[in-house]
Amino acid sequence: SQTIHQWPATLVQPVGSPLSLECTVEGTSNPNLYWYRQAAGRGLQLLFYSVGIGQISSEVPQNLSASRPQDRQFILSSKKLLLSDSGFYLCAWRKEGPVTQYFGPGTRLLVL
Amino acid sequence: AQSVAQPEDQVNVAEGNPLTVKCTYSVSGNPYLFWYVQYPNRGLQFLLKYITGDNLVKGSYGFEAEFNKSQTSFHLKKPSALVSDSALYFCAVEGRRAGSYQLTFGKGTKLSVIP
């Protein structure tokens, strides 16, 4: 069966510091991968998605970037965090087609 | 472009009573619709989906949803609510953009089941 992991689970970082969040998927190959941010426990904002290694599409201009160095690894990064980057970050995967998308457990980021 | 509306920010229901969480959608072409549930500080869990076939879709934990094409709705229902059903519920519609399938989510509805 497939599983999706995210780490760390919780992160507290000062403003201006770098960020690296990792997401990995097990039990499948060539998944579509997604990064979402959820602010204030509500709506989901799609940040990035990837259909293959090295292929990244950005949905909104922002302080963040994403990379996919391996087939089942998706990384969310920032060179300098802003207060507004605080939130709950969710990674998700799916196979191509109108099939179910599955979410990871999330990372809670607090920027102080 | 597709969109989803969840008109209620919060729904309160007494334990044992039936519950309904509303969702309407807008999409060109055939709609692919999903419901997810989120417990505090957790990721989203898949509940059910409509791709094609019967308008009444059954999912996890006793939930079901009714697809109504004429009203462009996909309301989530459960005959008898449990306190443990209290959570945040998201409706989503599938769309294809720039070569990839993507979900568009509603803003979420907080369900509180009162003992």
Image (cartoon, coloured by chain):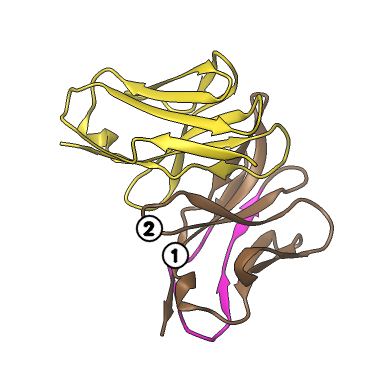
Chain colours: A yellow, B brown
Is A72 located above or below residue A106 in the figure?
above
Q: Residue furthest right?
A: B53
> Residue A51 — which label?
none
Amino acid at circle 1: Ala
Read off the chain for label 2. Answer: B
Residue at 50%, 78% in the rendered image: B82
Mark 1 touching mark 2, by CB under 8 A? yes
For the magenta stretch, what is the residue range?
A: B6-26
Name the residue beneath numbered marker 2.
B40
Amino acid at circle 2: Pro
Q: Is residue A105 left or right of residue A100?
A: left
Indicate the secondary structure of the residue bearing disc 1.
strand
Within 10 angstroms of label 1, few (less than 14), some, or many (20 or more) residues? some
Indicate the secondary structure of the residue bearing disc 2.
loop
Name the residue beneath numbered marker 1.
B87
Residue at 76%, 62% in the rendered image: B70
Q: How many marks?
A: 2
Residue at 64%, 53% in the rendered image: B34
Q: CA distance from mark 1 to mark 2?
A: 7 Å
Please determine if labels 1 and 2 lie on a single subunit: yes
Is A65 located above or below residue A112 in the figure?
above
Within 10 angstroms of label 2, few (less than 14), some, or many (20 or more) residues? few
- The verdict on residue B12 being magenta is yes
